[in-house]
């Protein structure tokens, strides 16, 4: 069965009337002081009420009607739904293989996206080819949507290059390790897009921990003042390494946008349809000159922060188990099966494709050539530097010492 991995497109529409909100979105429009109340869906668990958020697909796989956001996914076809499912399954398989490779000593580090597939695939498929994406170091699903070969993501984590792909080929910037700095890059790029008069938007990804960084606040200020066409997409996975969100903020993250003068909306980050719809709305708003938007994708990091982290030291198993019931892939599978949009042949074919991807990634990583050990000293200074020359000589002596040991 052939599968179209691209999500449904929707015709451009004016974003007028989308800016001022209370409830799921907050902010003010530049053209009017009137505010409107937005409809949101509240989900509940046995223990306590969940936060108010935009949801189109429940954890049980049932479709929830939403008059505001349904138009952004109204034209989606069964093939495109299967494509979203395929995207999430293959992204998870790639991520699992990368984690295994790190445990086997093939990678120095890995930041898993396990549990965040819907947030990344939904938002990634909402972008247009001419939009520009600024990721952190965990946006493997967004990279997949932008057409970046997954094997290219692994070079930096293996230590053989500084990125592995040309950002301008896919309008997908290199991974950013410095927490929050990419929001500044995205804001500046978006300001340039606006000055060029281009009909495109910019989206910047960051986590709940990065939302506490000064760089992010400065990005909010500049983007609001200059009405930059940028979407700030925060994946709130509940933990900034070992620090829970409630120890970083006294208000929901999406409400922070209100203080900067633009809308914020919280979406169910485990609902791929809701993430697709909300991000489409935000991007269209940016393209139409309405300025920035903050999207908070309320999700959960199922694994460790990185492979150097042990989450069992700071969070309970019961918490993870509660979120496992909201698994984004299982949620969409239930909907596909209930809607009779697929059959067992599709899942079997996808399983075969998934295993083939895992093998390809494993073989590609192990075949990566070691970099020139002395390349690190090149291009530090345009005309050279005595200290760099001294360090190069010291490193050469260090490398030569291993040859003496081998000869003994």
Image (spheres, helix red, strand yellow):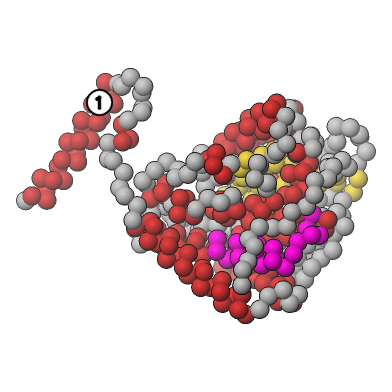
The residue at 74%/64% (across/down) is 77
Quarter location, residue 49:
bottom right
The 10 Å Cα crowd at callout 1, few under 14, some 14 to 19, many 20 or more, is few
Counting from the top left corner in percent of width and height, residue 196 is at 69, 27
Helix, strand or loop at label 1? It is helix
Can residue 50 be seen in the rendering of this structure?
A: no
For residue 151: magenta?
no
The residue at 81%/60% (across/down) is 74
Q: Extreme left residue here?
A: 408
Above/below status of 157 relative to 104: above
Q: Please indicate whether residue 34 sits to the left or right of residue 245 in the image.
A: right
Above/below status of 342 relative to 137: below
Q: Which residues are magenta?
A: 72-91
Above/below status of 335 relative to 100: below
Quarter location, residue 180:
top right
Above/below status of 196 relative to 101: above
The residue at 59%/50% (across/down) is 146
For residue 84: magenta?
yes
The total of numbered circles placed on residues is 1
Quarter location, residue 219:
top right
Q: Nearer the viewer, residue 221 or 77?
A: 77
Counting from the top left corner in percent of width and height, residue 184 is at 61, 33
Q: Please indicate whether residue 8 sits to the left or right of residue 99 in the image.
A: right
Residue bearing the label numbered 1? 389
Counting from the top left corner in percent of width and height, residue 325 is at 65, 70
Q: Nearer the viewer, residue 199 or 285?
A: 199
């Amino acid at each position: 069965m052939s599968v179209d991995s691209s999500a449904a497109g929707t015709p451009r529409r004016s974003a007028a009337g989308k800016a001022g909100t209370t409830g799921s979105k907050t902010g003010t429009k530049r053209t009017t002081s009137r505010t409107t109340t937005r409809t949101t869906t509240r989900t509940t668990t046995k223990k306590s009420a969940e936060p108010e958020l935009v949801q189109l697909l429940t954890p049980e796989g049932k479709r929830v009607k939403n008059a505001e956001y349904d138009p952004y996914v109204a034209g989606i076809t069964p093939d495109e739904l299967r494509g979203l499912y395929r995207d999430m399954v293959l992204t998870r398989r790639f991520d699992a293989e990368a984690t295994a490779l790190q445990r086997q000593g093939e990678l120095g580090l890995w930041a898993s996206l396990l549990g965040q597939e819907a947030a990344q695939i939904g938002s990634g498929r909402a972008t247009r080819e001419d939009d520009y994406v600024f990721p952190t170091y965990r946006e493997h699903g967004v990279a997949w949507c932008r057409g970046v070969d997954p094997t290219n993501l692994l070079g930096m984590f293996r230590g053989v290059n500084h990125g592995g792909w040309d950002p301008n080929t896919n309008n997908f910037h290199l991974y950013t390790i410095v927490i929050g700095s990419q929001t500044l890059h995205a804001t500046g790029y978006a300001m340039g897009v606006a000055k060029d008069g281009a009909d495109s938007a910019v989206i910047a990804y960051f986590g709940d921990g990065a939302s506490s960084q000064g760089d992010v606040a400065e990005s909010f200020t500049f983007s609001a003042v200059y009405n930059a066409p940028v979407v700030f997409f925060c994946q709130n996975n509940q933990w900034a390494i070992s620090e829970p969100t409630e120890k970083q903020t006294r208000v929901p993250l999406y409400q922070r946008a209100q203080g900067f003068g633009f809308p914020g909306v919280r979406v169910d980050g485990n609902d791929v349809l809701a993430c697709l719809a909300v991000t489409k709305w935000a991007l269209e708003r940016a393209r139409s000159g309405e300025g920035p938007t903050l999207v908070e994708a309320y999700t959960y990091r199922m694994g460790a922060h990185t492979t150097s982290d042990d989450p069992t030291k700071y969070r309970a198993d019961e918490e993870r188990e509660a979120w496992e019931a909201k698994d984004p892939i299982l949620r969409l599978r239930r909907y596909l099966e209930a809607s009779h949009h697929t059959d067992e042949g599709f899942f079997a074919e996808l399983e075969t494709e998934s295993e083939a991807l895992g093998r390809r990634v494993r073989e590609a990583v192990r075949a990566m050539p070691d970099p020139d050990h002395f390349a690190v000293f090149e291009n530090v200074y345009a005309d050279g530097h005595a200290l760099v020359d001294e360090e190069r000589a010291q490193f050469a002596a260090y490398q030569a010492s291993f040859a003496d040991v081998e000869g003994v």
